[in-house]
Amino acid sequence: MNEPAADLGFLAALAQFAFLQRAVAAGLLASVACGVVGTYVVVRRITYIAGAIAHSILGGMGAAVYLNRMWGWSWLDPMHGAVAAAVVSALVIGTVSLRARQREDTVIGAVWAIGMAVGVLFLAATRGYQVDVMGYLFGSISIVSPADVWLIVILDVVILAIVFAFYAAFAAVCFDEEFARARGVRVEAYYLLLLCLTALTIVLLVKIVGIVLVIALLTLPVAIAGSLTHTLGRMMLLATLLCAILTLSGVALSYGADLPAGATTVTLAGGVYLCAVAGRACWPWLTRQRGAPH
Amino acid sequence: MIAPTPSQPAVEFAGVSFRYDGPWALQEVDLAIPRGDFAGCVGPNGGGKSTLLRLALGLLAPTRGQVRVLGMPPAQARQRIGYLPQHNRLDAQFPASALEVVLMGRLGPKPQWGPFGREARRLAHEALRDVNMADLHARPFATLSGGQQKRVLLARALVCRPELLLLDEPAANLDIEAERQLYDLLRKLNERLTIVVVSHDMGFVSRHVRTAVCVNRMVHTHASSELSDEVIRRLYGREMRLVEHHPEPGHTHGPDCHHETIDAERK
């Protein structure tokens, strides 16, 4: 970050600068969706679908920038394009994986790459406009606008309301699809809805850590939480807390050291995850030593 | 529509044939399992046992013929069927307590808005008591033993108060003791509901069920219990060898190849 006040302490800077306050607010608010929806992504094992959705977002953002600049659609924000691309990708992948299971990975790969390619083409075709592609790819939490914060609030509310309403059905569909289907539960509808929630959450997180790093933030806090607790609700709560702590620490550390916030956050998350895995692996060994002192 | 009456069979197949994309998985199946029965579907892997069960659940539609469950089309009967799927179809590491897993059996076509109510939780506790798991309701499902997980899943099948219980390979990956406990439970449940078990384990079926339904593309029912263990095992062994070790291209064995032997004299 090339801010003039980089030599100030983080807390002093936070009190002083609105951009930093917005960055922190965005990080904390996105953590809610991240912890809740990330838990479903991990337990339903759809991390690669999440990856494809994330990368397809560049296509939507590129198209929005192009239409905005070249066709004068000034109301169109890159975030709108991101939401549209994410939801369309989620529905395409979801439909294919429900209808033709054996082609699922091919479609995931195709959506992943085509989304990126379309995005690059649109951005290249947008003449006379310097686009911060690095910001899209690796996050740009320091340039969160007030409108972005409001968008995150709205998406948070939508995601929480839907998860609260269909909590039991989502759990049943993730745990045992065949049984849910035999009960007459509309498995396809819930699965597609879950993928749409995943898409919306990814859009939120892309603002913070960017397209490339988003899978890490979506899954690592949940993976850490999963090694500490065994029920869905507690995993969501713990993952939300962890995600909030990690993004906050990421922003604070990167501000002091003048590093990219997204990459700092994800590296931090990776470090904590590895420690959790190592701790879990060593735990039985340590307790056994204590239990049998001879 | 004819109103379902208790005199109608629990499961009824009339001229049912089914195929996925390839050859017939089931052909010309006529089957009637009366209410209160304890039936076991046996036959080699790939013989169509699970297909039979999935037709009864309405998860598959017959290519030809008609399936009735409790006198109704299977999709309508769903709310009265308790189902225990094969163990490998679910995620045993899923983060949920035993009680939460049982509550999933309360779901149906109508959406469940928000958390489950008091009545549903009461029924779930009751179902856990029925399978002797009341004390472990708060335990994470992933930390339970294979036998305990099976009983929790059985409670999930029972929590909708079914009239018919369909179990797919309930004894798979259970040790002898857990299998015996499961059977004792099923025998007790059989006092109030009809049970159909699918198993490739002839031993389990011959030890425990009243009616044997032999499935190998075609279906033959033997309305009797007490099959001769030795005869079945010998025949089943030969059948398995034939399939697994001696694939003779020119040789096709009849679909009802264990029919006669299963029919053979009992001890």
Image: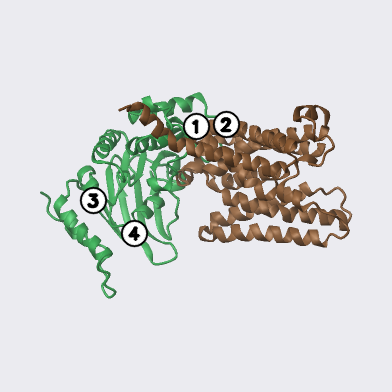
Chain colours: A brown, B green
Local packing at callout 3 (Cα closer than 10 Å; few below 14, some 14-19, many 20+) is: many
Q: CA distance from mark 1 to mark 3?
A: 40 Å
**Which one is in front in this view, the residue at disc 4 or the one at disc 1?**
1
Residue drawn where x is 64% and y is 57% of the image: A112
Quadrant in the rendering for residue A30: top right
Quadrant in the rendering for residue B130: top left
Is the C-beta separation of discs 2 and 3 under 8 Å?
Answer: no
Name which of mark 4 and mark 3 comes first in the sequence: 4
Dot 1: what SS?
Answer: loop
Quadrant containing the N terminus of chain A in the rendered view:
top right
In this view, the residue in front, A212 or B10, is A212
Q: Dot 3 corresponds to which residue?
A: B202
Local packing at callout 2 (Cα closer than 10 Å; few below 14, some 14-19, many 20+) is: many
Marks counted in the figure total 4
* Residue B46, numbered label: 4
Q: Dot 1 corresponds to which residue?
A: A229
Q: What kind of residue is marked 3?
A: Met
Q: Chain of mark 2?
A: A
On whether disc 2 and disc 1 are found on a single subunit, the reply is: yes
On whether disc 4 and disc 3 are found on a single subunit, the reply is: yes
